[in-house]
Amino acid sequence: MKAIQTVVALIALTSVLEFGKADCALGYTPKPDLAQQLEQSQVSPAPESTNLFEQGVKKQEQEDYTGAIADYTEFLKTHPDRLEAYSNRGFSKAMLNDLKGAMIDFDRAIELAPSNADVYNGRGNVNAMAGNLTASIRDFNRAIRCDRSFADAYYNRAISRHGIGDRRGAKVDLSQAAKLFQQQKDIGGYQQAREWIDKLK
């Protein structure tokens, strides 16, 4: 199971299907299962540090990204190898438009888990937000190589491909994303991918 759960990408379109930095957000929302994550740690964190991580998650869900960053940063002082904390902090930084800081956190997460599809997907979205579409496509490629059933990565790659003018590639990716969303019973993701496909016809 992935360390970070994913939901349908939140990258938005303008009415004319123009891709812009202001029209996008990260393509996943972390919803960590804390008990499972703690089992994956070699050393059980102390209760106070566990509370810091939980607080960070709650603040992130409430869109208090500054508060979430502070909690994750404090948590990482005692658990510097916790993938989820870097990924979640990277997400929060990106939502505050600190794209350089977000990239540093996702780079660290990739160092810790070079086969984790979610962290490549997260970094791909940060690259897309920064307008680095070619780099974002490379990240989504890596995410897909790590997990061939990762619907969000296909969807996000379609957005970036469309942004560089690869309309055909975008349609292929959207079709695959729609198929996977349907198989995974993600109705919202399926409908969003189908709407994109219809607009690209």
Image: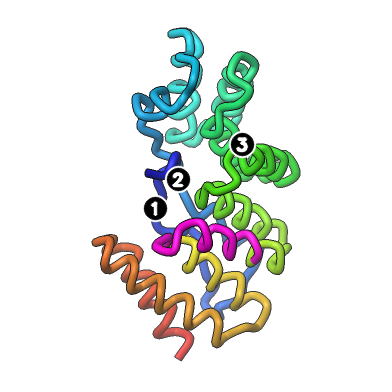
Mark 2 falls on what kind of element? loop
Earlier along the polypeptide chain: callout 1 or callout 3? 1
For residue 193, which numbered disc appears in the image? none
**Nearer the observer, 61 or 165:** 165
x and y, in percent, of residue 85 in the image: 55, 30
The residue to which callout 1 is attached is 7
Task: Residue at 69% x, 43% y: name it.
Answer: 107
Q: Tell us which disc is closer to us: 1 or 3.
A: 3
Asked if the residue at tag 2 contacts the one at tag 3, i.e. Cβ–Cβ closer than 8 Å, the answer is no
CB contact under 8 Å: marks 1 and 2: yes
Circle nearer the N terminus (1, 2): 1
Q: Give the answer, above or below, for where 43 lies relative to 170.
A: above
What secondary structure is the stretch in magenta mostly built from? helix
* Amino acid at pointer 1: Val
**Which stretch did the figure color magenta?**
138-150
Q: Residue at x 59, y 78 (%)?
A: 162
